[in-house]
Image (cartoon, rainbow, N blue to C red):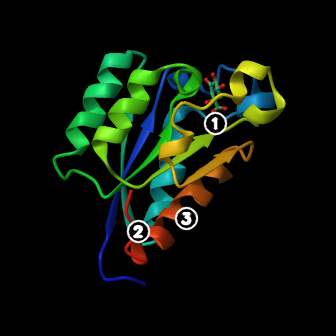
């Protein structure tokens, strides 16, 4: 265990506030609040801390990403929702944030409509986890822990 408590910014994009009301076969039954509690617990078990942000407004996510440049966090877990498939400005803001990042999707985006196979942020993320439901966030945290402990850059 590293002495350092890595600070992870967990960012959720558009429509993820609707978890619990969306198709449970794709997205499971947890609400966003329940999912975040789970992520917070897992982060703690890994000796990390997590902060959370969700918005349905693209510019707000962009500004949050800009803010992370100022040293608020060591790494990012980003589920951009549908923005991840077309919102190039979010890709650029993630690049500006300049932090090690993991892309997460609850559902398996590779097995759905063809347009969901596009990821505008994939090239900036050192790992992408898709189709593992809430466990995907556990995996993202574990990957980040390893990456940060090894001195990994963005
Ligand atoms: C999602 C997948 C996206 O394609 C979709 O638009 C979402 C959620 C996921 O977590 O599986 O809103 O990011």
Tell whether circle 1 marks a residue whose Cβ is less than 8 angstroms from ligand 1.
no
Q: Residues within 10 Å of mark 3 (few under 14, many from 20)?
A: some
Q: CA distance from mark 2 to mark 3?
A: 11 Å
As drawn, is 47 to the left or to the right of 116? left
As drawn, is 76 to the left or to the right of 66? right
As drawn, is 99 to the left or to the right of 14? left
Residue position marked by numbered label 2 in the rendering: 152
Tell whether circle 2 marks a residue whose Cβ is less than 8 angstroms from ligand 1.
no
Which is in the foreground here, disc 2 or disc 1? 2
Q: CA distance from mark 2 to mark 1?
A: 32 Å
Above or below residue 128? Residue 149 is: below
Nearer-N-terminus badge (2/1): 1
Q: Residue 104's x, y, as percent?
A: 59, 43
Please tell me which residue lies in front, 98 or 106: 98
Q: CA distance from mark 3 to mark 1?
A: 23 Å
Q: Secondary structure at mark 3?
A: helix
Which residue occupies 76% across, 37% down?
108
User: What label does residue 61 carry, if any?
Assistant: none
Which is in the foreground here, disc 3 or disc 1? 3
Q: Secondary structure at mark 1?
A: loop
């Amino acid at each position: 265990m590293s002495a350092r408590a890595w600070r992870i910014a967990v960012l959720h994009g558009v429509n993820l506030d609707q978890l619990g009301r969306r198709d449970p076969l794709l997205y499971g039954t947890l609400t966003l609040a329940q999912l975040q509690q789970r992520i917070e617990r897992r982060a703690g078990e890994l000796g990390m801390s997590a902060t959370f942000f969700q918005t349905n407004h693209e510019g707000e996510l962009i500004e949050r990403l800009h803010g992370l440049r100022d040293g608020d966090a060591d790494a990012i877990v980003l589920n951009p929702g549908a923005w991840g498939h077309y919102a190039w400005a979010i890709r650029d803001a993630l690049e500006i944030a300049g932090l090690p990042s993991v892309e997460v999707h609850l559902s398996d985006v590779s097995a759905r409509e063809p347009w969901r196979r596009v990821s505008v942020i994939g090239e900036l993320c050192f790992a992408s986890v898709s189709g593992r439901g809430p466990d995907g966030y556990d995996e993202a945290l574990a990957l980040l822990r390893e990456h940060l402990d090894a001195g990994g850059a963005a």
